[in-house]
Image: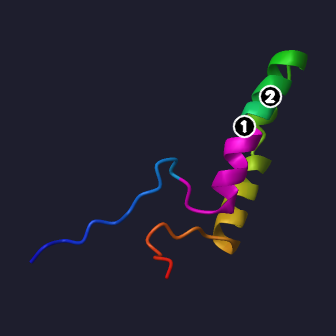
């Protein structure tokens, strides 16, 4: 019996939260570098990512017909 291989997103995106993180993380890093803050590690971003991933999942295994 062969095991069906699941398609994996090359960016590791499982939902909208991951997509937002891909865009927001470099912006937060730039803000931190420019003004000496720690925005990228505040914790709110991770909470937002989890919430958006739960509400808006991206299913890489879903086939379009």
Question: Residues under labels 1 and 2: Cα distance?
Answer: 12 Å
Quadrant of the image occupied by residue 28: top right
User: What's the mark number on residue 57?
Assistant: none
Residue 14 showing in the rendered view: yes
Do the residues bearing badges 1 and 2 touch, measured as CB atoms within 8 Å? no
Q: Which residue is mark 2?
A: 38
Outermost residue, bottom direction?
65
Q: Nearer the viewer, residue 59 or 21?
A: 59
Query: Which secondary structure, mark 2?
Result: loop
Q: Is residue 21 above or below residue 35?
A: below
Chief secondary structure of the magenta span? Answer: helix
Left/right of residue 1 with respect to residue 10 in the rendered view: left
Magenta-drawn segment: 13-24
Quadrant where the image shows the N terminus: bottom left
Instruction: State the mark number for residue 25.
Output: 1
Q: Residue at x 24, y 72 (%)?
A: 4
Residue 17, percent from left and from top:
69, 57
């Amino acid at each position: 019996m062969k095991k069906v291989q699941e398609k994996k997103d090359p960016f590791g995106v499982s939902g909208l939260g991951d997509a937002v993180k891909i865009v927001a993380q470099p912006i937060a890093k730039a803000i931190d570098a420019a003004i000496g803050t720690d925005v990228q590690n505040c914790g709110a971003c991770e909470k937002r990512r989890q919430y958006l991933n739960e509400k808006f999942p991206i299913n890489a295994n879903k086939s379009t017909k």
